[in-house]
Image (cartoon, rainbow, N blue to C red):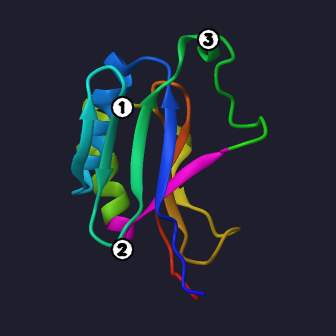
Amino acid sequence: MNTFLEHVIVNISNPKISFPFYKDLFIYFEHKMIAYKEGDHIAFRKKGSTDFWIVATEPKYIKNGFHRKNTGVNHFCFHVDSKEEVDKFNEEFLKPKGIKTLYNTPKSFPEYTKAYYAVFFEDPDRIKLEVASFAIKY
């Protein structure tokens, strides 16, 4: 059976803050906006990749908040082709927006694989995101 991950939905607490964050992020990675409903959801697609839907959390669930150590999603990783592209993303996207990186990144992670190089950061709800370069073997 041939399969792939079709879409991911991320619930956010404040559309006024998170929609612009994710819009800028996905446009940086050349995804097209495919859906938008003001205050409700925004979605992005890039040919051959997974759709990402960013959805406003229903008010009754916001009080629970998010923590990546709870059961559920820990983080999302965007793969790029080189260490230089990780650094370029850090310089062109994170630094101008004042987004602090996690774990003193970007840096190498030889404990993952020999050529693993990544930058980690958080969205406005503290969902961890990663941009990484590493050899993919299937």
Residue at the spot x=32%, y=28% of the render? 19
Report helix, strand or loop for mark 3: helix
In the displayed structure image, the side of residue 25 where residue 76 appears, left or right: right
Residue at the spot x=64%, y=26% of the render? 66
Q: Amino acid at mark 2?
A: Asp
Mark 2 crowd level (few <14, some 14–19, many ≥20, 10 Å Cα): few
Within the image, what quadrant is residue 93 found in?
A: top left
Q: Which residue is mark 3?
A: 60
Report helix, strand or loop for mark 1: strand
Q: Nearer the viewer, residue 103 or 126?
A: 126
Alpha carbon separation for disc pair 3 and 1: 17 Å
Report helix, strand or loop for mark 2: loop
Q: Amino acid at mark 3?
A: Lys
Q: Residue 20, can we see it?
A: yes
Within the image, what quadrant is residue 17 found in?
A: top left
Q: Amino acid at mark 1?
A: His
Point out residue 123 in the picture as x, y percentages from the top left corner: 46, 32
First along the sequence among labels 2 and 3: 3
The magenta segment: 73-84
Point out residue 110 in the picture as x, y percentages from the top left corner: 64, 70
Q: Quadrant of the N terminus?
A: bottom right
Q: Which residue is mark 2?
A: 81
Q: Which residue is mark 1?
A: 41
Q: Nearer the viewer, residue 93 or 68?
A: 68
